[in-house]
Image: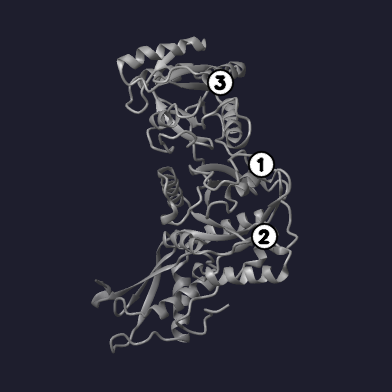
Amino acid sequence: MSGDDSGPDNSDPQMTTGAEHGTDDSGDDLLEGDLEGSGKPAPPAAIVAIVGRPNVGKSTLFNRLVGSRLAIVEDNPGVTRDRMYGAAEWDGLTFLVVDTGGIDPSLNTGMPAHIAAQAQVAIEEADLILLVVDAHDGLTAVDRDIAEQLRRSGTPILVVANKADSDRREIAASDAWELGLGTMYAVSAAHGRGTSELCDAIVAALPNDVTDAADPIPPGTRIAFLGRPNAGKSTIVNSLLSEARVIVDDAPGTTRDAVYLPLTFRDQPLVLIDTAGLRRRKQVSKAQEKLAAIKAIRALERTEVAVLVLDASMGVTDQDQRIARMAFERGKGVVVMLHKWDLVAKDPKKARDTLRDTEEALAFLERAYIVRTSVMGEGRDFGKGLARGLPEAIEGALKTARSLSRRIRTSDLNEELAKAVVDHSPPMHQGHGVRLYFATQVDRSPPFIVVSANRGRCLSPQYERYLIRRIRKRWDLRGVPVRIVVRGRGRGGSDKR
């Protein structure tokens, strides 16, 4: 490892592999009892599921009910795929709303089958179902098939005729009474027309014994999985949850919304965030892909640790480096996951070269943990495959999160500063000697250290890196951005601007 305490230099520090937190070529399976999670909000909050065929405005209604643009909305069918949760409040009651993808009972293969499976989970866990139809297009055979399917579920249902944005369309929406599911509510989710009456009906239809404690994002350390499309992020998330919580498909861009999923790891609450794959900007053409990328970046802002998922068979690309820098510069801890390691482990030379190249390409991450993972076998996309290295990856993420929020005692910090100055004095600044008086940590997540000196901004970049390296080594701050600022102290101890 370069960047030791021998003195400042102009080179970047090398990143170690964190082998103690990685796996060998054989790896270990997930340890039974380590991971517990369902990938859905914990009860007892009431759940309202929004269901219907594609392009009837389910996501628009979801955004209207939760009061935020959480779900991606576009005029093309099939935009929503995974289940999306949000909290809504009406008349003093808070409840969870779950958005689902458009379903068509006649399609039972490929992506439509994956979307239907996600919607079925939402139907089974719901206390109330909103069947959304299109007031403009009228009832279709698919609407009737979905209504029959929902009738068999035994869950209370409200029929919502959306896009009724005029008196004429509101009259046309009366066709929805033909479904025989009870009261029909004509609304325009885009304009808010009729939504107050719908919310009154929702609150009245919910069970009386539910609480008003509804949080779509439970507490816990947040870990976001970032990377290029098809790197295996959703497969990893499903394996950690041991269920098909998010859709996995060979087509790139399957995941669009950022999905927040609770998990318990060795008695520690976590929130896993599955995000859309990030491609280079010039390769992004569709509006929905741009929105998905924006949501992935927003999810990064709300997390503590970013897990950069790399396809081990392809190595580190320019886009992987951009994603890593984006996370690091935003003050996030970063863990590197060399996924699909089984594809390179068969060739020892290729495995060694891949590991070395990864260390060199991501050296700016300051010795981030690099963990080799694989999910193999039948059922791997549904959380049932043979997983290797995943507990080590989560453990590395937790250690990184603890380093990110670490508070260093001022006395210890000044002890290390004094030793650093004794070993290597700071260079002259504009022909004047530099004296470092004391250091203190003023913030964390990430660690932010202020050094008081006889002159402000008097340290060269090389000497600042030298101090940061000593601090990293002393407190084992791996994969965490450490920031340092030098302030000049004037007469009487006041800070110079």
Q: Earlier in the sequence, mark 3 or mark 2?
A: 3
- Which residue is under mark 2? 341
- Which residue is under mark 3? 146
Q: Earlier in the sequence, mark 2 or mark 1?
A: 2
Percent coordinates x, y for residue 65 in the rendering: 40, 28
Is residue 451 visible in this depiction of the protein?
yes
Q: Is residue 228 above or below residue 486?
A: above
- Which residue is under mark 1? 382
Classify mark 2: residues with Cα within 10 Å, few (<14), some (14-19) or many (20+). many
Q: Judge by depth and name the residue closer to the eye, 314 or 381.
A: 314
Spatial CA span between label 1 and label 3: 25 Å
Q: Earlier in the sequence, mark 1 or mark 3?
A: 3
Callout 1 secondary element: helix
Callout 2 secondary element: loop
Percent coordinates x, y for residue 72 in the rendering: 43, 38
Callout 3 secondary element: helix
Spatial CA span between label 2 and label 1: 19 Å
Quarter of the image where the N terminus is located: bottom right
As shown in the figure, which amino acid type bears the numbered disc 1?
Phe
